[in-house]
Amino acid sequence: MLEKIGVIGGGMIGGVLCQEIPRRQLARKLALVDIMPPDMAKGKCLDIAEGSPVALFDAQIAAGKTYDVLEGAELVINTAGVPRKPKPDGSLPSREELLSVNLKITDQVAEGINKYCPKAVVISIANPLDAIVYRLQQKLSLPRGKLMGMAGVLDSARYSYFVAEAAGVSVENVQALVLGGHGDTMVPIRSACRVAGLPAEQFLDEATLSAIEDRTRKAGGEVVKLLGTGSAFVSPAWSALDMAEAIIFDKKKIMAVSALLAGEYGVNDLFVGVPGLLGRGGVEKVIEISLTTDERAALDRSIAAVRKTCEEVDTVSA
Ligand code: APR
């Protein structure tokens, strides 16, 4: 158990995090910051605290519109951002417009972390994932491994779920891995997909696996379309909590994580989804696995897409 965990952004994902952190007893204290007036963060946390006698946990929760509530947090989960929604004239903002809005928010997030909890391990969930983590690192200059993005755990969970469903087996029987950037170019790694320890191909045919991998790449959009407003929030929150637990309990668990690369997979100074060993120090090691020629080529294409977005980030000044 940690002394204090901070959550930035108390919307849909942040709300699930604030329910689960005390319920799972991950920290003695929880802090939530969200700029939404009149004081949404405080309201949300009061609601959770008032439910604690029923759910049977002791909650010490601080919440507010300013970042001082994060003072001394050892672990921070960042969800602050705005989703893509129509402008008053009905048109959608361009990717560049959205990126520039979210980078401004990210700069505020970084300022808050720098001021109140500069030693925290940081897990970032806000989108566009790879660009936001890259920007955070520019502003925070954290030791490598202490800053990471949550995407691969979720994408891998989606791949696992679809395989389990198609094979008619428990999700507990399936191991799946998705690498690369968190977008259309992500790479489901078929050669690492196992059902009860056996290659997935022994359970599902080529066409089914291909369809599942395609669905995995588009899974976020599938949920967005069904919800009508907003994006997936339960599975992203649970995925970030899985990473948080690996860190808090020093599990040394290998998980797909957007990690800062220093030569691994031939990449320098970019955050890309790779297998990482998570423990108390954050991403303690990046694991280089062997891939098929096709998987390696797909990963290279995905890395190129991440690099392009990060070049855009470099053009947006603070
Ligand atoms: N500081 C703190 N909180 C902020 C800031 C800021 N500068 N700017 C915005 N927020 C808050 C918003 O007020 C909102 O409550 O961030 C919250 C984001 O919540 P939602 O809009 O409900 O978004 P959510 O579904 O939780 O997703 C959060 O994760 O998966 C990604 O694409 C998703 O980028 C999005 C993020």
Image (cartoon, rainbow, N blue to C red):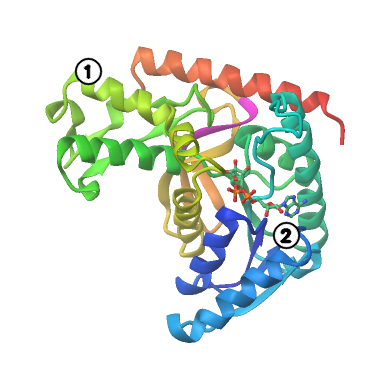
Q: Earlier in the sequence, mark 1 or mark 2?
A: 2
Q: Residue at x 16, y 42 (%)?
A: 196
Residue 157 in the image: x percent, y percent? 37, 42
Please name whichever residue, 38 or 178, is drawn nearer the observer in this view of the structure: 38
Q: Secondary structure at mark 1?
A: helix
**Residue 28 in view in this figure:** no
> Quick one: label 1, few (<14), some, or many (20+) residues within 10 Å?
few
Q: Main secondary structure of the magenta part?
A: strand
> Which residue is the extreme one toward the right?
318
Q: Which residue type does callout 1 highlight?
A: Ala
Q: Which residue type does callout 2 highlight?
A: Asp
Residue 103 in the image: x percent, y percent? 76, 37
Q: Residue at x 74, y 62 (%)?
A: 117
> Which residue is the extreme one toward the bottom?
53
CB at disc 2 and ligand 1 closer than 8 Å = yes
CB at disc 1 and ligand 1 closer than 8 Å = no
**Residue 225 in view in this figure:** yes
Q: Residue at x 76, y 51 (%)?
A: 109
Please report the bounds of the magenta region as a residue range.
268-275
Q: Are marks 1 and 2 in contact (CB under 8 Å)?
A: no
**What is the number of the mark on residue 76?**
none
Give the left or right position of residue 144, taking residue 22 as reference: right
Residue 3 lies in quadrant: bottom right
Please name whichever residue, 24 or 269, is drawn nearer the observer in this view of the structure: 24
Position above or below: 300 against 26: above
Residue 112 in the image: x percent, y percent? 80, 56
Query: In the rendered image, which residue does mark 1 sit on?
Result: 207
Q: Secondary structure at mark 2?
A: loop
Give the left or right position of residue 300, taking residue 69 as reference: left
**What is the number of the mark on residue 34?**
2
Position above or below: 36 against 55: above
